[in-house]
Image: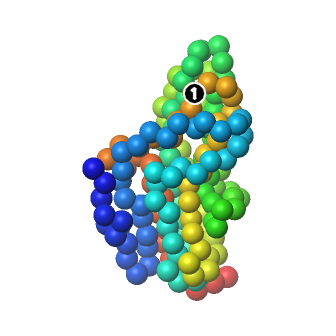
Amino acid sequence: MTTPANYRKGSTWLQTSPVDFSHDITGADRADELISEVEELKIPFPGVWEISYQARSYTGGTTAAVEFVRTALFKNSQLIPGTEALTGGHTVMQTTAGQTILEKFDVNDVITLHAYRIGANPAHVLSNSDGRTGVMAHWVSPGF
């Protein structure tokens, strides 16, 4: 079940809706891919926004192999430096990581969640209806 897109929106804050999904990271090692199951956030007015996310990742495979998932936020298809988070290790692992930063945005800028894998074993970004993976934005100032 998905929640309507306007579930968590206000005049100065935005939040993605909880959604159930499992996104297999199938691209090449260290090749970012859009986590399309997490809706994009479109900035309604310019200024400085506090943006944050959490992303639940899963790394699988043998205990002898190392596998990581790097997640990050993008603005208009470009990496937002400082939003990267890395999870994984030598074993099958599920964990939730994320970041919070301040960033200047223009009206209609788009924020999206991306991820890549490091290693050759299966890797995923997933969520369930309790909101394990999501993106939030809160307006804090008209500018620096």
Q: Is 144 on the left-hand or right-hand side of 61?
A: right
Q: Is residue 2 above or below residue 141?
A: above
Q: How many numbered discs? A: 1
Which residue is drawn at the image coordinates 63% and 60% (left, top)?
A: 74
Query: On the image, which quarter does residue 48 sit in?
Result: bottom right
Which quarter of the figure has residue 61? top right
- Callout 1: 10 Å neighbours few (<14), some, many (20+)? some
Question: Where is residue 122 shown, x and y percent of the image?
Answer: 57, 27
Identified at 64% across, 75% down, the residue is: 104
Identify residue for label 1.
Answer: 122
Q: Is residue 113 visible?
A: yes
Residue at (64%, 27%) from the top-left corner? 67
Residue located 42% across and 61% down the image: 16
Q: Nearer the viewer, residue 26 or 42?
A: 26
x and y, in percent, of residue 70 in the image: 63, 42
Vertical arrangement, residue 43 with respect to residue 7, above or below: below
Q: Is residue 95 above or below residue 93?
A: below
Q: Is residue 96 visible?
A: no
Residue 41: % across, % down: 49, 67
Identify the secondary structure beneath mark 1: loop
In the picture, residue 14 is in which quadrant?
A: bottom left
Residue type pointed to by label 1: Pro
Identify the residue at the far bottom of this view: 142
Judge from the rendering whether residue 10 lies leftward or rightward of residue 137; answer left or right. left
Colour mode of the rendering: rainbow
Locate the C terminus by quadrant.
bottom right
